[in-house]
Amino acid sequence: MSERIQKLLATAGIASRRAIETMIAEGRVTVNGRPAEVGQRIDHNDHVRIDTRLISLNRKPEPVRVLLYRKKTGELVTRDDPEGRRTVFRKLPELSTGRWIAIGRLDINTSGLLLMTNDGELARRLMHPSFEMQREYAVRVLGTIDAAAQARLRAGVELEDGFAKFETIKPGDNNVVVDDEADDAASAANSWWTVTVKQGRNRVVRRLFESQNTQVSRLMRVSYGPISLGRGIKAGTAREATPEELQALLEAVDLAEKKAARGGTAKKKAPTARRRPAAQASERPVPTHKPRRSPRAAAEAERKREFFDRGDGAPAGAGKGGPKREFKPGAAKPGAKREFRKDDGSAAPKREPRRDDSRPKPAAGKGITRGDSKKKSSAASSERAKPAPRRGESKPYVKPDKSKPRRK
């Protein structure tokens, strides 16, 4: 299924959609060797490169993950800071593919809940104004907020970038909102308030209070949509969202059915059915049909049946005539010639070796005997076994044999 190039690359965790559009406008993105266009539809079979780097588009979607991060005052929600200050991405767990995306931003002086996800579509919907995700903040205000100021903040105030308002505003409790870096010696002029907004504009909570001639001395986000911060996370650390929290987030932005259809969320395996015990021999059904056999196997079975059914010494194909005999492995075939030894006590005569009488016998004392031939062959072999003399060495002296006649 083809999708727009901005959406597919953002879902893969390359960058945000606006950043990808900027890359395309600068000519840094190519599809199948050609420059990409904004809004171009691609699929996983296309070869996408950013600055000559090949981008892998996974066919199987990764499971959706969400982290609950408790931001500290002084940390930045950015990947790279030129001044080298601390960022919220420095201690997050590593991902095999994609990257962590921060859902919304908190300024350097704001602490509290910050959601992270590896799914670009989920992050986009949670931040989009059309879904009106409610954010709750605990605010410590320096100044007085009377009933008239509360009414004006609920009704709405015109700011520099448009109309803004609090959905709810009510006095807070110091015992409920606890920050690891909070100053316990707060002055009596400060008061805690709990407010909710549905807009994610820049510093909207601070600017609304400043419009009523007050100043925010501490700001902390305590919930985002259906997710609450709670007390189980230390400042500067994160934890994985539970399956219930993840399901609530997906349902809040109408993604539960789509992610389940794509297999994006992890599903619990159904319990495997227990194996039935094997039936006893008496309870097993008796097969009513004969097993199918090949013609060759049927002919071989018929031949064996005839061999066992015919009598001893009966001709092949004689049927069932004659007495039956017991078949033993290694026994002689029927009709084979057998020899029986007589038990009369007489020993069988030894067979003499075969001799060719036509061959002349050597005369006594003449010719070469069998023993002499053996001696000569052994002497010749010993002579051959002697090593050849090396260079510069003389051959050993051998005494001549005077018994042999000298040649003339």
Image: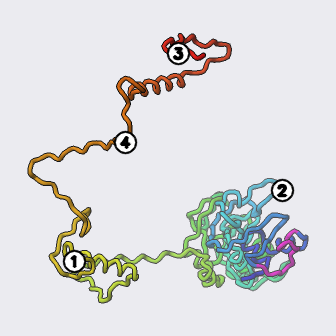
Q: In this picture, is 186 found above or below 213?
A: above
For discs 1 and 3, the disc positioned in front in the rendered view = 3
Q: Amino acid at mark 4?
A: Ser
- Residue type (three-letter) at the residue carrying disc 3: Pro
Please identify, in this view, whether the residue under mark 2 or under mark 4 is nearer the observer: 4
Nearer the N terminus, badge 2 or badge 4? 2
Range of magenta residues: 28-42
Question: Is label 3 in contact with label 4 (beta carbons under 8 Å)?
Answer: no
Residue behind mark 1? 310
Name the element at disc 4: loop
Marked residue nearer the N-terminal end (2 or 3): 2
Would you say the residues marked 2 and 4 are in contact, meaning their CB atoms lie under 8 Å apart? no
Does the magenta-highlighted stretch encompass residue 296?
Answer: no
Image coordinates of residue 206 in percent, x first then y, are: 77, 71
Figure quadrant of the N terminus: bottom right
Q: Would residue 308 be seen by someone viewing this image from the given angle? A: yes
Q: Earlier in the sequence, mark 1 or mark 3?
A: 1
